[in-house]
Image (spheres, grey):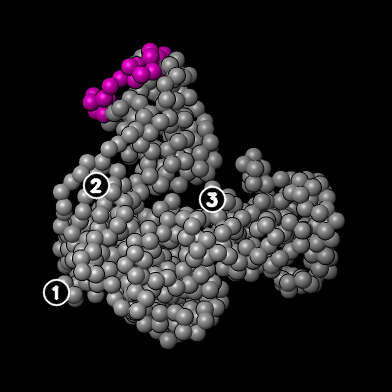
Amino acid sequence: MKRMFQVTGMVAAMLLAAGQTAGAEAGAMTPGTYSETVDSMKGKMTVTVTVDENSIKDIQLDTVDTAHIVGAVQTQMIPEILEAQSLKVDSVSGATVSSAAVKYGVRLALEEAGADTSVSFNADATVVPAEKEVEEAAVVVVGSGGAGLSTAIMLAENGVGHVILLEKQGFFGGTTSVSGGGVWAVGDTKFNQNTGFDYDADGLLKHIYEASGAEEGALNEGLIRNIADVSAEVFNYYLDDVGVPFDIETVDFGDSLSEMPVAWTDGAGGVLISHLVERAQNLGVDLRLNSKVDSLLVEDGAVTGVHVAGREAIYDIHSSKVVLATGGFQRNKELVEELTPDYVNAVPFTSAGSTGDGITMARELGAVVSGNTLAGLGGLGEQFGYEDLGSSIWGSAIFVNKNGDRYIDETAHYSYHLDAIMEQPDGKVFGIGDSTSSVYENIAQLVELRYAVTADTIEELAELIEVDPAELQKTVDTYTADLEAGNDDSVFGTANANMKSLSQAPYFALKMDGVSFAGLAGLVVDDTCHILNADNEVIPNLYGAGELVGSNILQGRYAGSGSQVGPSLYEGKIIADAIAAELK
């Protein structure tokens, strides 16, 4: 669905009143409205610019890019363009592709209007952050995904005083905002009552071990039990008090054992985050964007605050406690190579802020990392991952490697697919289907975006993707023979009822990637999320939450939907209770 964003004429006029005119930089223009269509993160973006003779009056976007990311561009960068009457403004941190598309579209529109764009319109402004005096806070939370926001909310609900939440990007949400927003809960919730499924702490622990394949004793069993104890209370709070639109009626199994249902947020992770942000604001949490924490303040081995190297200011915050909720590390190549070397070819489908900041800062104080895997599945690169057009891969009949051989039961739970892809020669895999596929209507668009190719024969298709034609034909023939004979798949045992046609031309091939959405390597914590050092001792005043400490509850393989977002929300309660008790 396309989303419309605009800065209204009244707002634009107010901003223009304080800025220089476009004419000073761009020269006289022919008044009117001009539209340009450019490439952006998830496809085409139409940028519509209204100008008078000397100034930009209005900028409007029509785009399929992620709503909250484009929203940050709309509320931050576009007003700056209108105020400065120039494209020499900062891109939005974490939204560089969408920001660049807007700038390019505006530049083309100005040229169409007759502006002189020989100057460097695409250069970002050089901003020199101001140095501010030291601030004081009760608690600083670093990161604004589900874990950080939930921690801040629960601290405020516990009556903890000044809580500051710092986000280095230009928008809130972290990787939670690009997730499906699914959670599970155990205990007395309306969801469990409606679905008829539930676990106690022992059952939850057993389930996670079995679903993830983690080695016995590898997980933080005390933390998992604490999560079980608080999850119903927290789930009910976000459902009933905060109004998060969880689907509490549908039995949708998201785990690899199909034994634990997941409650999805209507509107996915972005909607979940918007509710959490609103609640945090209403509770008086001090929320700050573009505020990167690059180091921890330490005195006598105890954490005493953070150093903020923000876009607009550099300053220290002294605080009694610091909570790191900085997410994963998949966008830090060096950390991926060090911590999860088997996944160096995985494509990150995470927040742009997943650069391992929390791991880096905490390890400087002696913190250690457990786990060595990533969670993910098949998808279409960083652009779509497993969402939107990326979900088209599941319309394929078979998945093959560069040799033309199938490498997995295509109907296996998604948590098995990333590892399987990483094991293939050069990590090259393809989804193969025919014109009867449920996603065939997407293929023309995917061909245009160069994610797919089509052909009238399997041999021609193989040549287009540089796979041995004879081997791919043999693979297709074996699969089709089983399907048409009414037999289950003779290679991987796929049930005949779940097999798909591969005999109706034209055929398509999707160029797939293994995409990662969560790190199963993270900092070691105790059962109340205090970060521990190599001697299993608490680093005073330092906590970790969410994906940063995900390996405490998941190792080996992703247990299934809700296994990251849910515990992130619940850890917020555990941490807030511990901090409130310590401060009192």
> What residue is shown at x 27% (from left), y 38% (from top)?
128
Report if residue 30 lies within the magenta region. Answer: yes
Q: Amino acid at mark 1?
A: Lys
Instruction: Pick out the residue farthest to the bottom.
Output: 202
What is the distance, in whole Å, between disc 3 and disc 2 at their CAs? Answer: 32 Å
Q: Which residue bears the numbered disc 2?
A: 314
- When asked about the image quadrant of residue 92, the answer is top left
Indicate the secondary structure of the residue bearing disc 2: strand
The residue type indicated by label 2 comes to Ile
Residue occupying image coordinates x 34% and y 74%: 533
Task: Tell me the CA gap for discs 3 and 1.
Answer: 46 Å
* Label ID, residue 459: none
The residue mark sitting in front, 3 or 2, is: 2
**Circle 1 is placed at which residue position?**
584
Residue, x 47% and y 80% (percent of image)?
A: 218
Q: In the image, which residues are magenta?
A: 13-33
Q: Which mark is residue 382?
A: 3
Q: Quadrant of the C terminus?
A: bottom left
Determine whether label 3 and label 2 are within 8 Å by CB.
Answer: no
Side of 204 relative to 23 (left or right): right
Q: Residue 424, image x and y in percent?
A: 68, 62
Measured as percent of width and height from the top left, residue 342 is found at 58, 65
Q: Amino acid at mark 3?
A: Glu
- Which of 157/484 is in front? 157
| Circle 1: element type | loop
- Which corner quadrant of the image does residue 358 belong to? bottom left
The answer, for residue 255, to whether it is visible in the render is no
Q: Is residue 440 visible?
A: yes
Was residue 227 drawn as part of the magenta stretch in this picture?
A: no
156 above or below 52? below
